[in-house]
Image: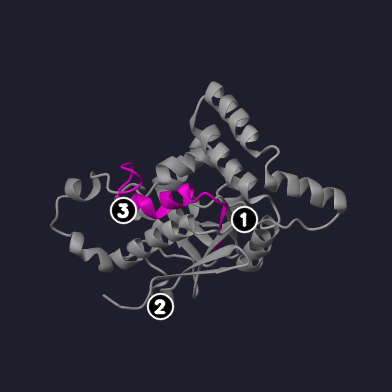
Amino acid sequence: MSDTPRVTVSCDNHIAHVRLTRPDKMNAVDQAMIDAVIAAGLEVAASDARVCVISGEGKGFCAGIDIGGLSTMLGQDPNDLLMPRTHGEGTTNQWQEVAMVWTRVPVPVIAAIHGVCYGAGLQLALGADIRIAAPDAKLAVMEMKWGIVPDMGGMVLLPRLVRSDVLRKLTYTGTPISAAQAEAWGLVTECADDPLVAAMELAESLTLKSPSALRATKALIGVAETEGAPAVLLEESRAQADLMGKPHQMEVVAATLQKRAPKFN
């Protein structure tokens, strides 16, 4: 196994930038990449970053699972490998955590997609709050090619984004689709000629929002996507009560009235 880092994390101006750094393999996911992506998610979650951008180096975002790199799985009982809940406070296995860890990062996460974004790479991108893709990017729920199902959080995340018939076509066929089609179907938030530049510009704009309100909003959306109306209404009120009159909210009000950029401690 190569000692080359699979992922790097840097932080500048309150923006965490997570880069997949295996360009010679199109950032394909092997065991080292799994470990590195999960570690990066935990690092960002524990940091003071206000927003996170995920990108891939080289010609593509991520080509999916590195079949050769996971050859150690051969001959092992799939139940022993897949069924234990080892991550996410007992809710995920390590493969699922590659995507799901980003849903638990308390700040907005933006994926900048270029080139190929297949299988495991797509599910990683689905863990982000927002996906910005290059016009020539290709996306695919690739697992059917190998006679398996999406099993890295895709079946939690895809139904939140696309219609049932779209979900079924994507998963039944495994056929790559264009960024434009992905945007039309809701898989991609928007297209941009340079998705990383666009992601960074969006991230910079979010650093001017209340950090506590951003975190509260992401948490509230998570509740809204999974709970019934009474629980959501109660959480709306609780989150709002926690924000109103606090330093971040007061600074937003003052900055707006004084027509200046806010300054948060």
Q: Residues within 10 Å of mark 1 (few under 14, many from 20)?
A: some
User: Mark 3 to mark 1: distance in Å?
Assistant: 31 Å
Dot 3 or dot 1: first in sequence order is: 3
Task: Residue under label 2, please give it.
Answer: 24
Residue nearer the viewer, 168 or 26: 26
Instruction: Find disc 1 in the rendering and name its residue.
Output: 180
Q: Left or right: where does residue 150 sit relative to residue 201?
A: left
Query: Could you tell me residue 107's position as x and y percent?
Result: 55, 51
Query: Is residue 88 positioned above or below 36 on the image?
Result: above
Element type where label 1 sits in the image = helix
Other residues around mark 3 within 10 Å, as few (<14) / some (14–19) / many (≥20): many
Nearer to me, 94 or 204: 204
Q: CA distance from mark 2 to mark 1?
A: 27 Å
Q: Secondary structure at mark 3?
A: helix
Task: Tell me, yes or no, if residue 250 can be seen here.
Answer: yes
For disc 3, the marked residue is 94
Is 126 a magenta residue? no
Q: Helix, strand, or loop for circle 2?
A: helix
What residue is rendered at 74% in x and 49% in y?
251
Q: Quadrant of the N terminus?
A: bottom left
Q: Point out which mark residue 241 bears.
A: none
Q: For residue 85, what is the image quadrant? A: top left
> Residue at 63% across / 51% down in the picture?
211
Q: Residue furthest top?
A: 230
- Whether tag 2 and tag 3 are in contact, CB under 8 A, the answer is no
Q: Residue at x 83, y 57 (%)?
A: 260
Q: Give, as a three-letter code, the residue at label 2.
A: Asp
* Residue 263 vertical placement versus 166 (above, below): below
